[in-house]
Amino acid sequence: MTRLGRPSENQLVTDCRVTFRLPLDWSVSMQKHIHIISRDKAKNLGMTAYFTGIPCKRGHIAERSTSNASCRGCRKLEYVKNTDKEKLRSKQWREKNKDRVIKVEKAYRTDNPNRSRLSKSVWYLKNKESQREKKIIWMKKNPDKVRAQNSKRRALFRNAEGHHTDLDIKKKLSLQNNFCNYCKKDLDVTGYHVDHIIPLSKGGTNWPINLQCLCPPCNQKKGNKLPSEWEELINKGVINV
């Protein structure tokens, strides 16, 4: 079962040809064409929500939950009015249904790999300060695991195809005119990191052709993303460089 109400990236709804444009005063995230589909068809497709285009009793033109036909517009208003109570209820439900949550989220990630990576990156960027603090605390509490991770990184580096020298790095800096390859900041001012364009963890090599010099902030934001993933985040305005 997919977690979202809409079909997954790998699903094709061939019998739903009609689309409905939501009102302009509805939420920005809902400003898109949505397939009109019956509740029975939505159930057969494993969807958790469906859309009829018909207003609910409160006048919302929104998706409805497949399980009980309730309006998600009404549900959203209730959540806003009782945020703390709803957060607690959601947390308690997830704790009681851990196995189900893990199964559904794993299926969603499998069906929607691109959407999952993007949402994860967006969430991290919105919470990077708190995540950094948690990471520092975790590293202090788990020195053995940190050493194991560092050893794995060194093993990747040793086992990757190719090699480069300090002279290769100097050539890269010269080719880039000592500017970051993304944000174009002066690397003499910011300092620089040597980045693997295709990450070692994803099959990249140590040959000079797979290297670039980035300022520390750009390298940290890029992490182990593939060039296509990185460019997608930039194009969508999720990351500013």
Image (tube, grey):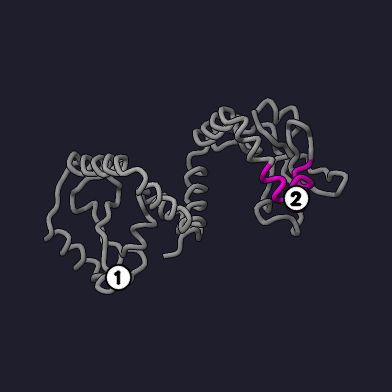
**In front here: 6 or 21?**
6
- Residue at horizontal 30%, vertical 48%? 198
Q: Is residue 227 above or below residue 5?
A: below
- Residue at horizontal 21%, vertical 53%? 209
**In front here: 105 or 177?**
105
Residue 104 quadrant = top right
Q: Write the start and end of the magenta stretch as one range.
A: 71-88
- Residue at horizontal 49%, vertical 47%? 120
Q: Is residue 232 above or below residue 109?
A: below
| CA distance separating discs 2 and 1 | 46 Å
**In front here: 198 or 17?**
198
Disc sitting over residue 82 in the figure? 2
* Image quarter of the C terminus: bottom left
SS at mark 2 in the image: loop
Residue picked out by circle 1: 190
Q: Is residue 57 above or below residue 194?
A: above
Give the crowd class for mark 1: few <14, some 14-19, many >=20 residues within 10 Å.
some
Most distant residue in the top direction: 44
Residue 184: x and y, percent? Answer: 33, 69
Q: Is residue 210 magenta?
A: no
Most distant residue in the front direction: 141
- Residue at horizontal 50%, vertical 60%? 237
Q: Label 1 is placed on what type of residue? A: Thr
Q: Is residue 78 magenta?
A: yes
* Image quarter of the N terminus: top right
Residue 9 quadrant = top right
